[in-house]
Amino acid sequence: MDDKRLFVNTTPGNRFLDKLTGKTKVRTFLILIVLLIATWDIRVILPFFILSWIALISLKPDWKKVWGVMAFVVVMNLFNLFLVWVVRPDYGLSICGASTVIFKFTDFYIITSETLWYFMVRFLKLLGTFTISLTFIQCITPSEMAAGLYSCKVPYKVCTIFSIAFRYIPDISRDFHSIKISMQMRGMELDSEKTSLWTRLKQNVLILVPLIITSFDRVGNIANGMDLRGYGKNKTRTYYAEHEEGPGDKKMKVVYMLFFAIMVFVIIWRVFFPGEYEVWCPWVS
Amino acid sequence: MKTPVIEFKDFSFRYKSQTEETLHDINLTIYEGEKVLLLGSSGSGKTTLGNCVNGLIPFSFPGEIKGSCKICGKETQEESIFAISSSVGTVQQDTDAQFVGLSVGEDIAFSLENDAVPRTEMLPKVAGAARVVGMEEFLGELPYSLSGGQKQKVALAGILHNNVKILLFDEPLAALDPAMGMAAVDLIDQVYKAQEKTVLIIEHRLEDVLYRHVDRIILMHEGRILMDTTPDELLSSDILKEKGIREPLYISALKHTGIRFSEKEHLEDIEELDYEKYKGPLQQAFHNVKIERREPEGEILLNVKNVDFFYGEHQVLKDVSFSVRKGERISIVGKNGAGKSTIARLICGIIRPKSGEVQLKGQNYMKMSIREIGRMVGYVMQNPNQMIVKDMIRDEVELAMKLNGFTEGVEERSEEVLKMCGLYAMRNWPVSVLSYGQKKRITIASILILKPEVIILDEPTAGQDYKHYTEIMNFLEGLNRDYNITILFITHDMHLAIEYTDRSIVFADGECIADGPVYSVLSNDDIIRRANLKKTSLVTLAEHTGLNPETFIYNFIETERKARQNG
């Protein structure tokens, strides 16, 4: 009834990215993530950053929710960068190889254009990774994810953890909710204005006890149910949620193979031709 | 000569964690194409026997087996659970836990997926199985939007495409309301006939299962097979009540007349009874007592006035009004989703009315917090495991007082409550050693300690057999009688309403469609139909013998209550 909607899709949508198979989605995602993690070069990061936004926009997600998490991630990242600056204001020197001072608070607390540049690259990189993950989560169902991972040779017992977890999270949150209510009726005050944070934390732990016990009961039943329907019988498995590849998948295959090539190139470049400095900066070198 | 599909020979089983055998000397043969009911109270070993058939014993529950158990001619101990599951399909009791897929289609396909069937072959099989159970329109639905009955249909579909020989239903009615239960029994019968399967049903709700014919009933008690006979013979004997099984109401009514059943009496199907023979005795036994309406006189504790409530756009309560007086015993009945639980949540202040008013002792409760309301209204949830948070019984019972900031008199009060609930002797025991029914008592005790005026119990007897059911209900009856505590039962168990409450409030589609004495509400055909409840067999009996259903039920209740008080 009042189940809170998760940020996860449970029914497949009908846009281009939605209609791809789990295999295509998972592969594209993994390649892009590795690629973005591997590079510090704005010439690689920027195109993928833009691409990830196009992909996210194409899904027409629930922007209210997206802005919520996005704002959180942005704020956390900016805070993180600020902390880096507090500890090493001249970080750009070690990472870009130059130090052009723009502003000077004290001799130690300076702002250099290289540090700012590094911060921007790092910010785009992290935000890009996040946008890609968000797009991925928005366009995939947990079952497709399990199927996709399975196609990447992940053992299916590992894949099942994903789909089963998502299947039962709403049930558990409902249990939590009803336990909380029964405790409130017995006199537990959870109103944030009337009790201290510490007391509320302790009380929430109290709620966890019955939650864990009921969840354990459930886990036993689930396991039996799966055994009875032959789970674990064979070494291989097929997926109902993994539909046949469509024309979109063939196109995407070309695209992700291209991404793969870029990824391999980036990694090889970094391993065999490491520059003197980590981050490429247009006005240094 | 029929071929045996399930054969137990001198079979005994002991769980690894236990010192005593759960099953003793089981000798049982079930033949191909039979429909058999395995009947027994909880702890009788019926579920254990079922687990021996589907292979969970010994594969998931290890233990010591003596004797032999053959499924389709093969000794189960020498097979794997997977080999057994290709001949035995099991529908489990917990409809939620066995729904592992994220959609209906996916769940039906689960065993096919495990068999690595290519998706192109999978789709028509899934669609076909869904059609058999009438779920073909719902293939894309999520489990969260399905009712218990629909989940059960999905579970059945999930084993049908496997071409299993034996269908095993473990307490299929436990999670369903009466109308859904009837539909489930009917569906099992249809599948049994159309697909020529062997069907084994494990249940304790005899009357509901007998809605459709079964060939044989096997009665279990304390790990042994007590009787292996036809429904007619079992019903005419007096063994059921002794072994903690509820007799069908119409059989109880017939027995009250003192009729002697002959050996070949047809009792299984209520439509086919020998009414000529019973008419006279029934009229004699239940005719003469006049209905005495007892009007409740206590002060009004709770007053619900013209309440509307919405979940989003969806209206779940429409103009609901009723009031509750001190000392009443009320059943709030209706099918699942009719608004029963919503009304309970409303009374507890978990949700508040959109329009209209709820008064507690004459005061509008809008300004009270849930905690404050909790001092007046106690709410006992269906599953005691969801309520118990402490390790020791005494701590659990005292918790509510401590949470409410009482420091003095806690011990005296808790001792008083523990005595009221018959738990005093166990006050220093850990909670974990208690049975389900005892845990239920603790949850009631932990509510009673705050001296609420009203207790609301959500399905107090769900999933319990007749013996434990009677125990809990008699306990609650005592609380009401001796301490004048007002009790509201939220239930879809018609038996409970008839036997233990005086007044019934019936809900259908968020509306309160009836409010009155139990015997007149539940004998009203129109209300029963509108609320999608099950007509009790007493009404059917009355109709066939020309008795007035209302007086008949009234008299029946009186007779039963007298018998209970004397015995």
Image (spheres, coloured by chain):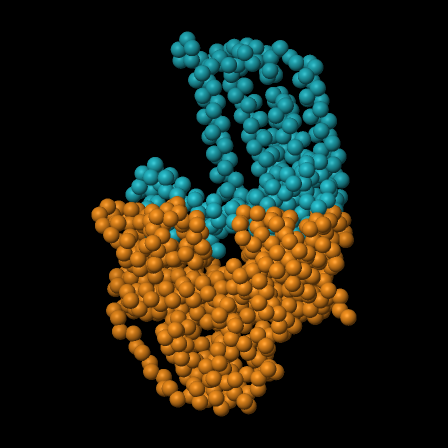
Is residue A74 visible in this depiction of the protein?
yes
Q: Nearer the viewer, residue B454 or B90?
A: B90
Total labels: the figure holds 0
Q: Nearer the viewer, residue B130 or B254?
A: B254
The answer to whether B216 is drawn above or below residue B136 in the figure is: below
List the single residue furthest toward the top. Answer: A107
Residue B8 position in % (x across, y down): 67, 60
Please tell me which residue is depicted at 37% across the width and 64% down the height of the picture. B475
The answer to whether B388 is drawn above or below residue B244 in the figure is: above
Query: Residue B231 appears in which quarter of the rendering?
Result: bottom right
Is residue A248 visible in this depiction of the protein?
no
Residue B351 position in % (x across, y down): 38, 56
Residue A125 position in % (x across, y down): 58, 26
Please tell me which residue is depicted at 38% across the width and 67% down the height of the picture. B474
Placement of the C terminus of chain B among the 4 image quadrants = bottom left
Which chain gets the orange colouring?
B
Please tell me which residue is depicted at 49% across the width and 82% down the height of the picture. B254
Question: On the rendered structure, is B498 left or right of A161?
Answer: left
Please tell me which residue is depicted at 64% across the width and 48% down the height of the picture. B59
Placement of the N terminus of chain B among the 4 image quadrants = bottom right
Residue B135 position in % (x across, y down): 64, 62
Q: Colour of chain A?
A: cyan
List the single residue furthest toward the left. Answer: B408
The answer to whether A132 is drawn above or below residue B71 in the figure is: above
